[in-house]
Image (cartoon, grey):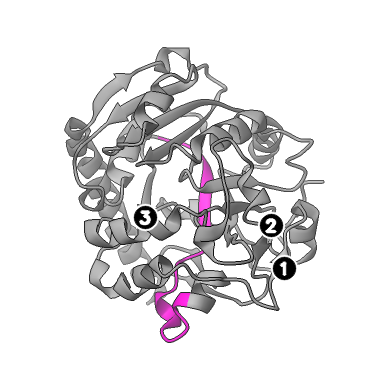
Amino acid sequence: MVWRTEAAIRYRQRWKRRRLLYRALRKRRQLTPVIDRTAQIRPDDILAVSSVRNESARLPFFLEHHRKLGVAHFLFVDNCSDDGTDDYLAAQPDVSLWSTPHSYRLSRFGLDWLTWLQSQYAHGHWCLMLDADEILIYPHHDTRPLPALTDWLDRTGRQSFGTLMLDLYPKGPLGTQTYQPGDDPMQTLCWFDRGNYTIRKQPHLQSLWIQGGVRARCFFGANPRRAPTMNKVPLVKWHWRHVYVNSSHALLPRHLNRVYDEDGGEETSGILLHTKFLPEIVAKSAEEKARREHFANSALYDDYYDALADNPDLWCERSSRLTGWRQLEAMGLMSRGNWV
Protein backbone atom coordinates (compact mmCIF):
# COMPACT_ATOMS: atom_id res chain seq x y z
CA MET A 1 0.00 0.00 0.00
CA VAL A 2 2.23 2.77 -1.35
CA TRP A 3 -0.16 5.55 -0.40
CA ARG A 4 -0.15 4.40 3.25
CA THR A 5 3.65 4.32 3.30
CA GLU A 6 3.80 7.79 1.78
CA ALA A 7 1.27 9.11 4.28
CA ALA A 8 3.30 7.68 7.15
CA ILE A 9 6.48 9.33 5.85
CA ARG A 10 4.75 12.69 5.56
CA TYR A 11 3.31 12.34 9.06
CA ARG A 12 6.70 11.52 10.62
CA GLN A 13 8.43 14.31 8.75
CA ARG A 14 5.79 16.84 9.76
CA TRP A 15 6.38 15.99 13.43
CA LYS A 16 10.15 15.97 12.95
CA ARG A 17 9.98 19.45 11.47
CA ARG A 18 7.92 20.65 14.42
CA ARG A 19 10.40 19.13 16.88
CA LEU A 20 13.32 20.81 15.16
CA LEU A 21 11.55 24.17 15.13
CA TYR A 22 10.79 23.76 18.81
CA ARG A 23 14.48 22.96 19.48
CA ALA A 24 15.41 26.22 17.77
CA LEU A 25 12.86 28.09 19.88
CA ARG A 26 14.44 26.70 23.06
CA LYS A 27 18.01 27.31 21.91
CA ARG A 28 17.32 31.00 21.26
CA ARG A 29 18.16 31.59 24.92
CA GLN A 30 21.74 30.54 24.17
CA LEU A 31 22.22 33.54 21.86
CA THR A 32 23.36 36.95 23.08
CA PRO A 33 23.09 39.86 20.63
CA VAL A 34 26.39 41.66 20.04
CA ILE A 35 25.22 44.05 17.34
CA ASP A 36 21.74 43.98 15.83
CA ARG A 37 21.37 45.83 12.53
CA THR A 38 18.39 43.81 11.31
CA ALA A 39 16.27 46.97 11.12
CA GLN A 40 18.25 47.69 7.93
CA ILE A 41 16.84 44.61 6.18
CA ARG A 42 14.52 45.54 3.30
CA PRO A 43 11.73 43.32 1.96
CA ASP A 44 13.60 42.18 -1.17
CA ASP A 45 17.04 41.78 0.40
CA ILE A 46 18.96 38.55 -0.05
CA LEU A 47 20.34 37.37 3.30
CA ALA A 48 23.10 35.02 4.42
CA VAL A 49 23.37 33.16 7.73
CA SER A 50 26.45 31.47 9.18
CA SER A 51 27.91 30.21 12.44
CA VAL A 52 31.64 30.82 12.85
CA ARG A 53 34.56 30.21 15.15
CA ASN A 54 38.03 31.65 14.56
CA GLU A 55 37.53 32.54 10.91
CA SER A 56 39.26 35.94 10.82
CA ALA A 57 41.50 34.84 7.94
CA ARG A 58 38.65 33.82 5.63
CA LEU A 59 36.00 36.41 6.43
CA PRO A 60 37.32 39.43 4.48
CA PHE A 61 37.18 37.57 1.15
CA PHE A 62 34.01 35.68 2.10
CA LEU A 63 32.13 38.90 2.82
CA GLU A 64 33.47 40.78 -0.20
CA HIS A 65 32.66 37.95 -2.63
CA HIS A 66 29.08 37.50 -1.43
CA ARG A 67 28.47 41.24 -1.24
CA LYS A 68 29.45 41.47 -4.90
CA LEU A 69 27.03 38.66 -5.70
CA GLY A 70 24.22 40.62 -4.05
CA VAL A 71 23.89 39.54 -0.43
CA ALA A 72 22.52 42.60 1.40
CA HIS A 73 22.76 41.48 5.03
CA PHE A 74 24.64 38.80 6.96
CA LEU A 75 23.44 37.12 10.18
CA PHE A 76 26.33 35.55 12.11
CA VAL A 77 26.57 33.49 15.28
CA ASP A 78 30.05 33.54 16.82
CA ASN A 79 30.91 30.50 18.94
CA CYS A 80 33.76 31.55 21.26
CA SER A 81 36.23 32.96 18.75
CA ASP A 82 39.53 34.14 20.22
CA ASP A 83 41.22 35.39 17.04
CA GLY A 84 39.31 38.67 16.59
CA THR A 85 36.50 37.22 14.46
CA ASP A 86 33.82 38.74 16.70
CA ASP A 87 35.34 42.24 16.68
CA TYR A 88 35.84 42.14 12.92
CA LEU A 89 32.24 41.10 12.26
CA ALA A 90 30.79 43.61 14.72
CA ALA A 91 32.51 46.40 12.77
CA GLN A 92 30.94 45.45 9.42
CA PRO A 93 28.01 47.73 8.51
CA ASP A 94 25.93 44.97 6.89
CA VAL A 95 26.37 42.36 9.64
CA SER A 96 24.21 41.47 12.63
CA LEU A 97 26.05 39.36 15.18
CA TRP A 98 25.10 37.08 18.06
CA SER A 99 27.45 35.18 20.35
CA THR A 100 27.15 31.95 22.31
CA PRO A 101 29.48 29.90 24.53
CA HIS A 102 27.33 26.78 24.19
CA SER A 103 28.16 23.54 22.41
CA TYR A 104 28.21 23.65 18.62
CA ARG A 105 27.65 19.88 18.47
CA LEU A 106 24.68 19.95 20.86
CA SER A 107 23.04 22.71 18.85
CA ARG A 108 22.90 20.35 15.85
CA PHE A 109 26.20 21.84 14.66
CA GLY A 110 24.82 25.38 14.80
CA LEU A 111 21.55 24.62 13.02
CA ASP A 112 19.37 25.31 16.05
CA TRP A 113 20.83 28.81 16.39
CA LEU A 114 20.60 29.61 12.70
CA THR A 115 17.08 28.20 12.37
CA TRP A 116 15.94 30.62 15.06
CA LEU A 117 17.55 33.59 13.29
CA GLN A 118 16.06 32.53 9.96
CA SER A 119 12.60 32.20 11.46
CA GLN A 120 12.85 35.71 12.87
CA TYR A 121 14.55 37.62 10.06
CA ALA A 122 14.58 35.58 6.83
CA HIS A 123 10.87 34.78 6.36
CA GLY A 124 9.97 35.73 2.79
CA HIS A 125 13.58 36.35 1.77
CA TRP A 126 15.94 34.36 -0.39
CA CYS A 127 18.50 33.22 2.16
CA LEU A 128 21.93 31.61 1.86
CA MET A 129 23.23 29.27 4.54
CA LEU A 130 27.01 29.14 4.25
CA ASP A 131 30.05 28.17 6.24
CA ALA A 132 32.91 30.68 6.20
CA ASP A 133 34.96 28.26 4.10
CA GLU A 134 32.31 28.10 1.33
CA ILE A 135 32.28 30.42 -1.68
CA LEU A 136 29.17 30.30 -3.86
CA ILE A 137 29.48 30.41 -7.63
CA TYR A 138 26.95 29.56 -10.35
CA PRO A 139 26.69 29.92 -14.14
CA HIS A 140 27.35 33.55 -15.15
CA HIS A 141 27.98 34.58 -11.53
CA ASP A 142 30.65 36.96 -12.83
CA THR A 143 28.11 38.94 -14.88
CA ARG A 144 24.70 38.11 -13.34
CA PRO A 145 24.25 38.88 -9.63
CA LEU A 146 22.17 36.84 -7.21
CA PRO A 147 19.04 39.01 -7.65
CA ALA A 148 19.00 37.99 -11.33
CA LEU A 149 19.17 34.33 -10.32
CA THR A 150 16.53 34.59 -7.59
CA ASP A 151 14.21 36.57 -9.88
CA TRP A 152 14.44 33.73 -12.40
CA LEU A 153 13.86 31.14 -9.67
CA ASP A 154 10.77 33.06 -8.55
CA ARG A 155 9.41 33.33 -12.10
CA THR A 156 9.86 29.61 -12.73
CA GLY A 157 8.29 28.55 -9.43
CA ARG A 158 11.49 27.27 -7.82
CA GLN A 159 11.97 27.73 -4.08
CA SER A 160 15.49 26.32 -3.69
CA PHE A 161 18.80 26.09 -5.52
CA GLY A 162 21.24 23.18 -5.28
CA THR A 163 25.02 23.00 -5.43
CA LEU A 164 27.91 20.58 -5.32
CA MET A 165 30.51 21.33 -2.65
CA LEU A 166 33.88 21.17 -4.40
CA ASP A 167 36.95 20.65 -2.21
CA LEU A 168 39.89 22.77 -3.34
CA TYR A 169 43.50 22.10 -2.36
CA PRO A 170 47.04 23.27 -3.17
CA LYS A 171 49.92 21.46 -4.81
CA GLY A 172 52.37 20.61 -2.04
CA PRO A 173 52.06 20.10 1.74
CA LEU A 174 49.12 22.04 3.15
CA GLY A 175 51.04 23.82 5.90
CA THR A 176 53.76 25.18 3.60
CA GLN A 177 51.40 27.37 1.56
CA THR A 178 50.94 31.10 2.13
CA TYR A 179 47.68 32.94 2.67
CA GLN A 180 46.87 36.35 4.14
CA PRO A 181 43.43 37.65 5.24
CA GLY A 182 41.69 39.23 2.26
CA ASP A 183 43.55 37.14 -0.33
CA ASP A 184 41.55 35.19 -2.87
CA PRO A 185 41.76 31.62 -1.48
CA MET A 186 41.46 30.22 -5.01
CA GLN A 187 44.94 31.59 -5.72
CA THR A 188 46.28 29.24 -3.04
CA LEU A 189 43.78 26.39 -3.44
CA CYS A 190 43.62 25.97 -7.19
CA TRP A 191 43.28 22.19 -7.65
CA PHE A 192 40.34 19.79 -7.33
CA ASP A 193 39.22 16.22 -8.09
CA ARG A 194 36.95 16.16 -11.12
CA GLY A 195 35.60 12.66 -11.50
CA ASN A 196 35.49 10.41 -8.44
CA TYR A 197 31.91 11.14 -7.37
CA THR A 198 29.06 8.80 -6.54
CA ILE A 199 25.43 9.87 -6.40
CA ARG A 200 22.38 8.26 -4.83
CA LYS A 201 18.89 9.39 -4.02
CA GLN A 202 17.61 9.48 -0.45
CA PRO A 203 13.98 8.51 -1.05
CA HIS A 204 12.50 9.61 2.29
CA LEU A 205 13.88 13.13 2.02
CA GLN A 206 13.84 13.14 -1.80
CA SER A 207 17.36 14.54 -1.61
CA LEU A 208 20.60 13.54 -3.30
CA TRP A 209 23.58 11.99 -1.55
CA ILE A 210 26.81 12.78 -3.36
CA GLN A 211 30.19 11.64 -2.07
CA GLY A 212 33.68 11.89 -3.50
CA GLY A 213 36.36 14.46 -4.09
CA VAL A 214 39.74 14.73 -2.46
CA ARG A 215 38.57 13.91 1.06
CA ALA A 216 37.05 10.62 -0.08
CA ARG A 217 40.23 9.83 -2.05
CA CYS A 218 42.79 10.71 0.61
CA PHE A 219 41.09 10.10 3.96
CA PHE A 220 38.18 7.67 3.49
CA GLY A 221 39.46 5.23 0.88
CA ALA A 222 39.09 2.29 3.28
CA ASN A 223 35.58 3.31 4.31
CA PRO A 224 34.03 5.42 1.52
CA ARG A 225 30.55 5.44 3.08
CA ARG A 226 31.96 7.69 5.83
CA ALA A 227 33.23 10.25 3.32
CA PRO A 228 31.62 13.71 3.62
CA THR A 229 28.37 14.52 1.85
CA MET A 230 29.08 16.89 -1.03
CA ASN A 231 25.61 18.06 -2.12
CA LYS A 232 23.99 21.10 -0.53
CA VAL A 233 20.89 23.25 -0.90
CA PRO A 234 22.30 26.56 0.37
CA LEU A 235 19.89 29.01 -1.27
CA VAL A 236 16.20 28.85 -0.28
CA LYS A 237 13.19 31.16 -0.43
CA TRP A 238 12.77 30.99 3.33
CA HIS A 239 9.59 30.44 5.31
CA TRP A 240 9.53 30.33 9.08
CA ARG A 241 8.27 26.72 8.91
CA HIS A 242 11.35 25.56 6.99
CA VAL A 243 14.18 23.78 8.74
CA TYR A 244 17.45 22.20 7.72
CA VAL A 245 17.82 18.58 8.80
CA ASN A 246 21.56 18.05 8.32
CA SER A 247 23.80 21.06 7.69
CA SER A 248 22.47 22.48 4.41
CA HIS A 249 22.41 19.04 2.80
CA ALA A 250 18.64 18.56 3.16
CA LEU A 251 15.55 20.40 4.42
CA LEU A 252 12.00 19.92 5.50
CA PRO A 253 9.52 20.21 3.84
CA ARG A 254 11.23 17.75 1.55
CA HIS A 255 10.04 19.23 -1.75
CA LEU A 256 12.79 21.83 -1.24
CA ASN A 257 15.35 19.07 -1.78
CA ARG A 258 14.22 18.34 -5.35
CA VAL A 259 16.88 20.47 -7.01
CA TYR A 260 17.58 17.86 -9.70
CA ASP A 261 15.82 16.56 -12.83
CA GLU A 262 14.63 12.96 -12.64
CA ASP A 263 13.75 12.78 -16.35
CA GLY A 264 17.26 12.91 -17.74
CA GLY A 265 17.58 16.66 -18.07
CA GLU A 266 19.78 19.07 -16.14
CA GLU A 267 18.45 21.40 -13.47
CA THR A 268 20.25 24.71 -12.98
CA SER A 269 22.84 24.32 -10.22
CA GLY A 270 25.94 25.90 -8.75
CA ILE A 271 29.10 25.13 -6.80
CA LEU A 272 30.26 25.84 -3.28
CA LEU A 273 34.02 26.21 -3.60
CA HIS A 274 35.25 24.68 -0.35
CA THR A 275 38.36 26.44 1.03
CA LYS A 276 38.86 24.15 4.01
CA PHE A 277 42.47 23.30 3.11
CA LEU A 278 44.14 26.67 3.72
CA PRO A 279 47.46 26.35 5.63
CA GLU A 280 45.82 26.87 9.04
CA ILE A 281 44.07 23.49 8.72
CA VAL A 282 47.19 21.68 9.94
CA ALA A 283 47.18 23.39 13.35
CA LYS A 284 43.38 23.53 13.55
CA SER A 285 43.02 19.78 13.07
CA ALA A 286 44.70 18.96 16.37
CA GLU A 287 42.51 21.54 18.11
CA GLU A 288 39.28 20.24 16.58
CA LYS A 289 40.21 16.65 17.39
CA ALA A 290 40.50 17.67 21.04
CA ARG A 291 37.29 19.76 21.03
CA ARG A 292 35.18 16.97 19.44
CA GLU A 293 32.54 19.43 18.28
CA HIS A 294 32.28 18.72 14.54
CA PHE A 295 31.01 15.14 14.30
CA ALA A 296 28.26 13.29 16.15
CA ASN A 297 30.69 10.44 16.90
CA SER A 298 33.99 12.30 16.79
CA ALA A 299 36.17 9.33 17.81
CA LEU A 300 35.43 7.73 14.44
CA TYR A 301 37.22 10.65 12.74
CA ASP A 302 40.42 10.68 14.82
CA ASP A 303 42.39 9.21 11.92
CA TYR A 304 41.10 11.97 9.64
CA TYR A 305 42.30 14.70 12.00
CA ASP A 306 45.63 12.92 12.52
CA ALA A 307 46.18 12.72 8.78
CA LEU A 308 45.54 16.45 8.38
CA ALA A 309 47.84 17.29 11.29
CA ASP A 310 50.62 15.40 9.46
CA ASN A 311 50.68 18.17 6.82
CA PRO A 312 49.73 16.05 3.78
CA ASP A 313 50.08 16.82 0.09
CA LEU A 314 46.65 16.14 -1.47
CA TRP A 315 47.69 16.74 -5.08
CA CYS A 316 48.00 13.84 -7.50
CA GLU A 317 48.56 13.39 -11.25
CA ARG A 318 44.80 13.26 -11.84
CA SER A 319 44.17 16.63 -10.12
CA SER A 320 42.59 19.37 -12.24
CA ARG A 321 43.54 23.04 -12.03
CA LEU A 322 40.62 25.42 -11.46
CA THR A 323 40.11 27.96 -14.24
CA GLY A 324 36.52 29.15 -13.78
CA TRP A 325 32.83 28.34 -13.83
CA ARG A 326 32.75 27.47 -17.54
CA GLN A 327 35.29 24.72 -16.93
CA LEU A 328 33.18 23.31 -14.08
CA GLU A 329 30.07 23.41 -16.25
CA ALA A 330 31.87 21.63 -19.10
CA MET A 331 32.91 18.90 -16.64
CA GLY A 332 29.29 18.42 -15.58
CA LEU A 333 29.87 19.60 -12.00
CA MET A 334 27.25 22.34 -12.36
CA SER A 335 24.72 23.30 -15.00
CA ARG A 336 23.02 26.28 -16.60
CA GLY A 337 19.93 24.16 -17.17
CA ASN A 338 17.16 26.41 -18.49
CA TRP A 339 18.80 29.58 -17.17
CA VAL A 340 20.64 31.03 -20.17
Instruction: Name the secondary structure under disc 3.
Output: helix
Q: Name the residue: 47% across, 13% down.
A: 40
Percent coordinates x, y for residue 151 in the rendering: 68, 33
Q: In this view, does 229 lie to the left or right of 110?
A: right
Compare residues 90 and 207 and report the one nearer the observer. Answer: 90
In the image, which residues are magenta? 219-239
Cα–Cα gap, marks 3 and 2: 37 Å
Q: Is residue 230 magenta?
A: yes
Residue 174 in the image: above or below residue 178: below
- Give amino acid for label 1: Ser
Instruction: Name the secondary structure under disc 1.
Output: strand
Cα–Cα gap, marks 1 and 2: 24 Å
- Give amino acid for label 3: Lys
Q: Name the residue: 59% across, 55% down.
A: 163
> Do the residues bearing badges 3 and 2 touch, measured as CB atoms within 8 Å?
no
To which residue does mark 2 refer?
Answer: 267
Percent coordinates x, y for residue 258 in the rendering: 55, 57
Q: Does the magenta stretch include residue 288?
A: no
Spot the residue most to the bottom. Answer: 222
Looking at the rendered image, the disc whose residue lies closer to the viewer, 3 or 1, is: 3
To which residue does mark 1 refer?
Answer: 320
Looking at the rendered image, the disc whose residue lies closer to the viewer, 1 or 2, is: 1
Q: How many marks?
A: 3
Can residue 212 be seen in this snapshot? no
- Give amino acid for label 2: Glu
Residue 108 in the image: above or below residue 94: below
The 10 Å Cα crowd at callout 1, few under 14, some 14 to 19, many 20 or more, is: some
Q: Which callout, 3 or 1, points at the residue further toward the start of the chain?
A: 3
